[in-house]
Amino acid sequence: MTKRMRNFVRGVGSILDIAPKSRAYKHAYTNKDSDRLQDDLERVGRDMCNVIGRTDVKRKPRNAA
C-alpha cells in the first residue's frame, strides 16, 4: 500500500471513527462535577472581588424625602 493510500485510509477511518488517530478519552474530565462547579464559582468570586476592588465610585446617600 502506498503512503498516499495509507493516509487516505487513515483519514477516512478517522472520519468514520473506525480507527481514530488520537484518543478522545485524554480530553475527558477526571474531576467530579461538584469539584468543577466549586472551582468555577471560586473563580467567579475572585473575578467579582477584583472588579469591586477596582471601582472607586463613592455613592451619594439617598435623600430621605
Image: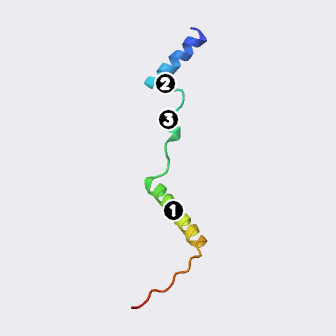
Q: Earlier in the sequence, mark 2 or mark 1?
A: 2
Residue at image location 55% in from the left, 14% down from the top: 6
Foreground mark, 2 or 1? Answer: 1
Percent from the top left, x then y, of residue 56? 59, 76
Q: Earlier in the sequence, mark 3 or mark 1?
A: 3
Could you give the CA–CA distance between mark 3 and mark 1, rounded to whole angstroms?
Answer: 29 Å
Amino acid under disc 3: Ala
| Residue pointed to by mark 3 | 24
Mark 2 element type: helix
| Residue pointed to by mark 1 | 44
Percent from the top left, x then y, of residue 65? 39, 91
Amino acid under disc 2: Ser
Mark 3 element type: helix
Residue 14 marker: 2
Could you give the CA–CA distance between mark 2 and mark 3, rounded to whole angstroms?
Answer: 12 Å
Q: How is the image coloured?
A: rainbow
Q: Is residue 39 above or below residue 3?
A: below
Q: Residues within 10 Å of mark 2 (few under 14, many from 20)?
A: some
Amino acid under disc 1: Val
Foreground mark, 2 or 3? Answer: 2
Task: Tell me, yes or no, whether the two marked residues, 2 and 1, touch with CB atoms within 8 Å.
Answer: no
Residue at image location 51% in from the left, 62% down from the top: 44
Residue at image location 51% in from the left, 59% down from the top: 39
Q: Residues within 10 Å of mark 3 (few under 14, many from 20)?
A: few
